[in-house]
Image (cartoon, grey):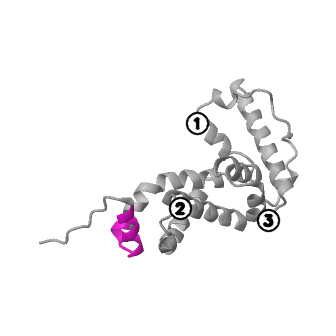
Amino acid sequence: MGIRKREYSTQQEIIEGCIKREPTAQRKLYEIYAPRMLTLATRYSGDRERAKDVLHDGFITLFNKIESYGGFGSFEGWMRRIFVNTALMSLRKADVLRNSEQIDYASGEMSDAPDAVESISSKELMELIASMPDGFRLVFNMYAIEGYSHQEIAKELNISEGSSRSQLSRARAWLQERIRRQNEGERF
């Protein structure tokens, strides 16, 4: 008789298996969450290859820290925090914020077209976000998508709250300008 593989039918069983370092549970967790975490990593890094590194490092961190998940709140939310932090560490190592304050070609003014984002697909929007300058993309992701406050962003990125607000304002203006151009059929 062969060895019977353990079936994991609930998230809790998968987590318990991962705590016990069971490869089948780890594989199952990876299969469930890797696509979402790769999307998150790509949003932050703006580069698919760097995102794959973040995904790899994030799962290593997750499997090493999974026993610290207390079962309170959303497991995916807890996991997302690990992947955001992993992406931020990767970007800090690459020193992507070094020149973020010198980006002058995007004004802080937002257009009056509130429905600009509604005119493009979610895939096109994600591609535009991924193509943002690094500082804009980091702050935009942390604030608009992950829900960090400017105070939290400032602490995580070692910048002032004013810089965080400025980067967000510029990111929004940059994004609206690119959407406007795309809607008018211009090339970037």
The amino acid at mark 1 is Ser
CB atoms of marks 3 and 1 within 8 Å:
no
- Label 1 sits on residue: 122
Q: Residue at x 35, y 73 (%)?
A: 22
Could you give the CA–CA distance between mark 3 and mark 1, rounded to whole angstroms?
A: 31 Å
Task: Give the residues in magenta.
Answer: 12-25
Q: Please determine whether, in this image, residue 66 is positioned above or below residue 98.
A: below
Question: Looking at the rendering, in which quadrant would you find the C terminus?
Answer: top right
Q: Which of marks 2 and 3 is nearer the N terminus?
A: 2
Residue 37 image position (x, y, % from top left): 53, 55
Residue at 47%, 74% in the rendered image = 67
Between 187 and 61, the one lying in front of the other is 61
Tell me whether the residue at label 2 lies in contact with that at label 1, contact meaning CB atoms closer than 8 angstroms. Answer: no
Percent position of residue 49, x then y: 58, 57
Q: Which amino acid does label 3 sit on?
A: Asn
Q: Residue 79 carries which label?
A: 2
Give the residue displayed 66% in from the left and 51% down from the top: 147
Nearer-N-terminus badge (2/1):
2
Which element type, helix, strand or loop, lies under badge 3?
Answer: loop
Q: In this view, does 109 lie to the left or right of 141?
A: right
On screen, residue 142 above or below 25: above
Q: Distance between the residues labelled 2 and 3?
A: 23 Å
Q: Name the residue under label 3.
A: 158
Image vertical order of residue 183 relative to residue 130, above or below: above
Which amino acid lies under the numbered mark 2 shown in the image of this protein? Answer: Met
Residue 170 falls in image quadrant: top right
Residue 35 visible in the snapshot: yes
Q: Residues under labels 2 and 1: Cα distance?
A: 23 Å
x and y percentages locating residue 79 in the rendered image: 53, 61
Name the quadrant of the N terminus.
bottom left
